[in-house]
């Protein structure tokens, strides 16, 4: 069993971090609930069934507005899968931001998420970040209790290396089913590291070697957050583009036109072409942009090796070593 079932959208996941209004300050209201409803409808409209949360997103408001939509839409919970994360604590007395995967913290934060989401269980719980003070046996105890209570059905991690996953898995009685990492055509350390072994350029990348291979070899789903690269290649980036960004965006647009699809589908299709069967997480709250991702799986299936490598080289701004 994996973290999600194959859908018409081809492994796409909807990331709910953009829902709920500002990160700090104001409470959510009707406008934020309607925004969440529209995003959920758009995501389901292209076949997405897995919705990704974290207890810290928008200071809990992302989960809360999603829960409002679930409460007012009978039968919706049975049609979707919910995934949330715990392990990061923000703006608390004593330390301004730290990691906490202690048993008490895991239990507390999951119960809080369930209350905000207005559901009895989440399909997948991800441990959000490695905690240097983590005791694997403590994590195993918390997860075992949550599963025995029917509050969590599967366990995954986020931002962990293959070695960290193996260290944790040794103490668990259930398999780790997913690892969520930042992966995109722009954030390519996961890819560059695989071809820069024994090469001076490897010093510029900190991605731990063997992580992808560890996950693929053990059937751990790789989920890619930031998969659309904040619109860098699709015309909506808030950043000042580099020469490589501009050249890559032009190539993406050219391929999209030739294939009769959107630029978003090309960017995601490139990621999904990789044999690790990467599942992109879409973070946009714009229904039109969500809908623009619909053909990503078809693009991945049809993309040639030359097209795939061409995009990689363009994004690098230089040829491969």
Image (spheres, rainbow, N blue to C red):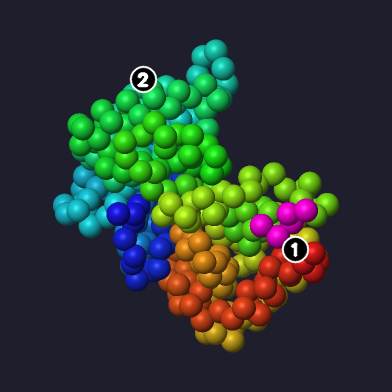
> Is residue 253 covered in magenta?
no
Q: Is residue 12 left or right of residue 245?
A: left
Residues in magenta, as a range: 194-198
Q: Which residue is pictured at 31% across the width and 43% down the height? A: 154
Q: Is residue 200 above or below residue 26?
A: below
Give the total of numbered labels: 2
Quarter-of-image position of residue 103: top left
In front of the other: 267 or 300: 300
Q: Is residue 113 visible?
A: no
Quick one: which residue is furthest to the left in this view? 74
Q: CA distance from mark 2 to mark 1?
A: 44 Å
Callout 1 crowding tier (Cα within 10 Å): few <14, some 14–19, many ≥20: some
Q: Which residue is mark 1?
A: 316
Q: Which residue is pictured at 48% across the width and 51% down the height? A: 215
Q: Which residue is mark 2?
A: 104
Residue 105 x %, y %: 39, 22
Quarter-of-image position of residue 170: top left
Callout 2 crowding tier (Cα within 10 Å): few <14, some 14–19, many ≥20: few
């Amino acid at each position: 069993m994996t973290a999600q079932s194959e859908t018409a959208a081809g492994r796409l996941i909807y990331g709910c971090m953009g829902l709920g209004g500002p990160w700090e300050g104001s409470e959510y209201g009707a406008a934020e609930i309607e925004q969440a409803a529209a995003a959920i409808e758009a995501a389901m409209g292209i076949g997405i069934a897995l919705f990704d949360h974290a207890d810290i997103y928008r200071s809990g408001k992302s989960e809360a507005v999603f829960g409002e939509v679930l409460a007012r839409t009978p039968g919706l919970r049975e049609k979707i899968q919910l995934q949330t994360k715990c392990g990061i604590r923000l703006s608390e007395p004593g330390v301004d931001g730290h990691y906490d995967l202690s048993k008490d913290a895991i239990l507390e934060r999951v119960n809080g998420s369930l209350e905000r989401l207005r559901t009895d269980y989440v399909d997948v719980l991800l441990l959000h970040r490695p905690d240097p003070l983590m005791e694997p046996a403590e994590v195993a105890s918390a997860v075992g209790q949550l599963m025995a209570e029917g509050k969590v059905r599967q366990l995954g991690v986020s931002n962990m290396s293959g070695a960290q996953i193996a260290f944790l898995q040794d103490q668990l009685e259930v398999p780790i089913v997913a690892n969520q990492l930042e992966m995109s055509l722009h954030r390519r350390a996961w890819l560059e590291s695989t071809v820069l072994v024994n090469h001076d350029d490897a010093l510029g990348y900190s991605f731990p070697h063997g992580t992808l291979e560890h996950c693929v070899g053990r059937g751990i789903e790789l989920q890619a957050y930031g998969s659309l690269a904040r619109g860098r290649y699709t015309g909506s980036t808030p950043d000042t583009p580099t020469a490589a960004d501009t050249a890559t965006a032009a190539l993406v647009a050219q391929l999209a036109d030739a294939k009769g699809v959107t630029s978003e589908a090309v960017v995601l299709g490139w990621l999904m072409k990789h044999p690790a069967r990467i599942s992109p997480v879409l973070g946009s709250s714009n229904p039109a942009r969500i809908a623009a991702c619909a053909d990503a799986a078809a693009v991945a299936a049809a993309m040639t090796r030359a097209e795939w490598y061409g995009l990689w080289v363009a994004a690098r701004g230089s040829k491969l070593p």
